[in-house]
Image: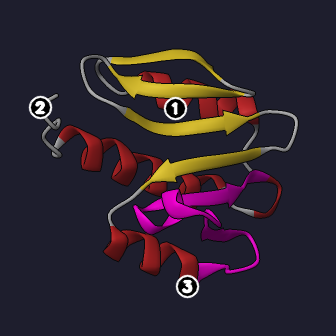
Amino acid sequence: MMTTDSFRSLALSFPGVVEQPHFERTAFKVSGKKIFATLLESGRTVNALLSIEEQATFCQYQPEAIYTVPNSYGLKGWTTFELDHLDEPLVAEALYCAYQYVMNTPLKKK
């Protein structure tokens, strides 16, 4: 099981990551890029932005604890991870995938 403190430490260990409030959650974003993960401490859940292919793969591991966010964000790759039911290496791998996905996705021009 991964704690919220260990999740926060891991997320902040990636180069260029900053932590900031995001509604009732804490967001982790790459400076100059977009959010790759959010943490809801009270619910002990993480939402991570994965590619659609990675989302499908992770959701197969433990569908009761890893699942698509149930709205339009889920269709874009946002995936929920319930920390109480998952091993730290699995969450760490997903977080790294989310970080890499955001790092390698060009920002849309406004």
Q: Nearer the viewer, mark 2 or mark 3?
A: 2
Q: Is residue 53 above or below residue 99?
A: below
- Find out whether the residues at labels 2 and 3 contact each other: C-beta distance under 8 Å: no
Q: Residue at x 57, y 54 (%)?
A: 91
Q: CA distance from mark 2 to mark 1?
A: 30 Å
SS label for mark 2: loop
Q: Nearer the viewer, mark 2 or mark 1?
A: 2
Left or right: 12 in relation to 65: left
- Find out whether the residues at labels 2 and 1 contact each other: C-beta distance under 8 Å: no
Left or right: 103 in relation to 34: left
Looking at the rendered structure, the kind of residue marked 2 is: Lys
Residue 23 at what x, y percent from top left?
68, 25
**Which mark is first along the chain, 3 or 1?**
1
Magenta region: which residues?
A: 61-83
Looking at the rendered structure, the kind of residue marked 1 is: Leu
Query: Outermost residue toward the front?
Result: 110
Residue on which the image places disc 1: 10
Q: CA distance from mark 2 to mark 3?
A: 34 Å
Residue on which the image places disc 3: 60
Number of other residues with Cα within 10 Å of mark 1, as a class: few under 14, some 14 to 19, many 20 or more: some
Instruction: Tell me, yes or no, whether the highlighted magenta stretch contains residue 72.
Output: yes
Residue 32 at what x, y percent from top left?
24, 18
Query: Outermost residue toward the right?
Result: 42
Residue 28 at what x, y percent from top left?
49, 27
Residue on which the image places disc 2: 109
Q: Nearer the viewer, residue 60 or 6?
A: 60
Q: CA distance from mark 1 to mark 3?
A: 23 Å
Left or right: 15 in relation to 28: left
**Which mark is first along the chain, 1 or 2?**
1
